[in-house]
Image: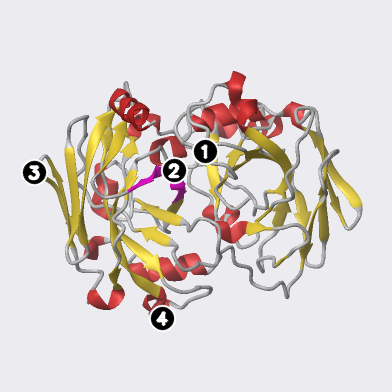
Amino acid sequence: MKRTVFAVALNHPSQTAAWDAAFHAPPYQALPKTPVWFIKPRNTHRANHQAIALPSGEQTYSGGTLAVVIGRRARKVSEAHAQEYIAGFALANELSLAEESFYRPAIQAKCRDGFCPLGEAAPLEDAYHLDIITEVNGVEKQRWNTRELHRSAPQLVAALSEFATLEPGDVILLGTPQQRVPVNEGDDVTVRAAGLTPLVSHFRHDAPAQTQPQAHPTLFALGLNYADHASELDFKAPDSPLVFIKAPNTLTGDNAVSVRPDGVDYMHYECELVVVIGKTARNVRREDALDYVAGYTVCNDYAVRDYLENYYRPNLRVKSRDTLTPLLPTVVAREQVPDAQNLALQTFINGELRQSGNTRDMVFDVPYLVSWLSEFMTLQPGDMIATGTPKGLADVRPGDEVVVEIEGVGRLTNRIVSEQQYEESLNEKN
């Protein structure tokens, strides 16, 4: 299991009950209408019996759950046929710090090193009435059953594959109860379920650093990282980086197409400078941060604002749909970019300039972002940080040619197509 690990929040009745009052008050106003997805990136992945270092000064909680392992490519799969795309199930521990809000991406709570141990996959005759048991030092601390979940594995496979193509080896974590199990230094935590190999994790202060070189590099992205862009969306600039993670299914290249979903009112581009990490970075000082940067490239981080809900903003249906992130494959070495904080950004639609800005207007600059992320997680070579976009958004529609360009870094072109056009092109290839 070395591909993308998707996880779903608020999939257990105890969670929605605990948050019900908050979700009917500002800023939420209403319960979520669709699954609330997030991603556990490669720095969080650990195998059975591996040691995990706990963050100091923070209480970590165990979230024993069941993982669905995808067996073959799944795209727009119906619930009735979803079981055909499931290769098996595994135990997982969705470790987290305390969940204090669902309004912003909880990367500091969810994406720390080792915060996603995964067990061995196996077929199960009945994954839908399965007791998930968590033990700490041999003592049972929690027991819940998968039949309690709001959405079953087939329902989640169908919901996710509606907008994100799943590949063999991708994983979906089915969620946890609201009440999690606290874990502390020296604890051995075991997650059990009938028919599956127990998942054991050792929490030790001297746990060695782990790398996942075969897993997908992580693409981090910044929301509201230009004050003028935040203002045009009626937000104030954030007090700390608003970072979310983009799944690999969303990536395309230069001169590729991006799909505008049918029936939406507003899909916009975002011209962004992308930082490419060159060597392993952990607890990096801001003044040393550029030493860990291999170079820079350009992406266009499209968003479909119709799908925005105030939970784990911006959610995967907005930002991680298939084809919505064209990325220039060439990387300009850091040494060839004298000042990454003084680069002009431009976006053209059908040859007309529609967006213009400069990287000097970032709220959080490149050294700050590298240092900030490395404080609580290990950045690995090939990881990328898309640093946000300035003001100047506009709707794009099928037939539009969109060009994003960053001074000294590159020019990226792509074309907007309809769902029908995209499906026809896929059928032609097949």
Quadrant location of the C terminus in the rendered image = top left
Mark 4 neighbour density, 10 Å: few (under 14) some (14–19) many (20 or more): few
Q: Are marks 2 and 3 in contact (CB under 8 Å)?
A: no
The residue indicated by pointer 3 is 351
> In the image, what residue type sits under mark 3?
Gly
The residue indicated by pointer 1 is 166
Q: In terms of image quadrants, where is residue 122? A: top right
- Name the disc covering residue 182, or none: none
In the rendered structure, which segment of residues is drawn in magenta? 245-252
Would residue 72 be found to the left or right of residue 329 on screen? right
Q: Quick one: SS at disc 2?
A: helix
Q: Are marks 1 and 4 in contact (CB under 8 Å)?
A: no
Residue 1 highlighted magenta (yes or no) = no
N-terminal label among 1 and 2: 1
N-terminal label among 2 and 3: 2
Residue found 24% across the figure and 43% down from its top: 232
Would residue 382 be found to the left or right of residue 202 on screen? left
The residue indicated by pointer 4 is 288
Q: Nearer the viewer, residue 242 or 349?
A: 349
The residue indicated by pointer 2 is 249
> Cα distance, mark 1 to mark 4?
38 Å
Q: Are marks 1 and 2 in contact (CB under 8 Å)?
A: yes
> Cα distance, mark 3 to mark 1?
35 Å
Q: Which one is in front in this view, the residue at disc 2 or the one at disc 3?
A: 2
N-terminal label among 4 and 2: 2
Would residue 341 be found to the left or right of residue 175 on screen? left
N-terminal label among 3 and 1: 1
Q: Which one is in front in this view, the residue at disc 3 or the one at disc 1?
A: 1
Q: Which one is in front in this view, the residue at disc 4 or the one at disc 3?
A: 3
